[in-house]
Amino acid sequence: MRQRLRDLADRHRRFGHPRLHILLRREGFRANHKKTHRLYCEEKLQVLKRKQKRRTAVMRQLDTSNYPPFGDDECCGEVAGGLMALGGVDIGNMA
C-alpha cells in the first residue's frame, strides 16, 4: 500500500491525501483515512504549490478621437498625449 500511495502521488502531483485515499480504495486497498494520512506523512509526500504569475503594469494607448478635448476646468484631466496613467500618476511628469 505504501508503494502504491507513492506511485499515485507521483502520477497525480496535485492530489492531496484525501483524494489519494479515494483512489486507493477504488483499487481495493482497505484502510481508513487515518492510516492513509499517516503513510502520506511518513513518505514526506506533499502537494506542490503553484507559482504565482507575475503581474506587470501595462500602459495602454487610448483612442482620443471619440472624446472631446479637455479644458483647464475639467475634473478628469488624467489623459495626456493619448496615454492613460494607471493609478492616477501623471505621465507628463514621469521622466
Image (cartoon, rainbow, N blue to C red):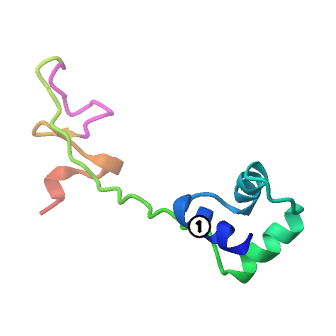
Instruction: Based on the picture, tell me whether residue 52 belongs to the magenta stretch.
Output: no
Residue 76 falls left or right of residue 30 = left
Residue type of the residue flagged with mark 1: Asp
Q: Position of residue 32 (x, y in %)?
A: 89, 62
In the depicted structure, whether residue 37 falls above or below residue 16: below
Residue hosting label 1: 7
Write the residue at 73% across / 63% down. Answer: 17
* Quarter of the figure with residue 16: bottom right
* Quarter of the figure with residue 95: bottom left
Write the residue at 63% across / 58% down. Answer: 15
Q: Position of residue 83 (x, y in %)?
A: 16, 41
Residue 12 falls left or right of residue 62 = right
Pick the front one: 35 or 59: 35
Write the residue at 49% across / 62% down. Answer: 50
Pick the front one: 70 or 40: 40
Write the residue at 86% across / 70% down. Answer: 35
Pick the front one: 58 or 39: 39
Q: How many numbered markers are drawn?
A: 1
In the depicted structure, whether residue 67 falls above or below residue 79: above
Look at the image and tell me in which quarter the N terminus lies.
bottom right
Pick the front one: 54 or 95: 54
Residue 20 falls left or right of residue 63 = right
Tag 1, which secondary structure?
A: helix
Residues rendered magenta in the picture: 67-78
Q: Position of residue 11 (x, y in %)?
A: 53, 61
For disc 1, the neighbor class at 10 Å (few under 14, some 14 to 19, many from 20) is few
In the depicted structure, whether residue 71 falls above or below residue 6: above
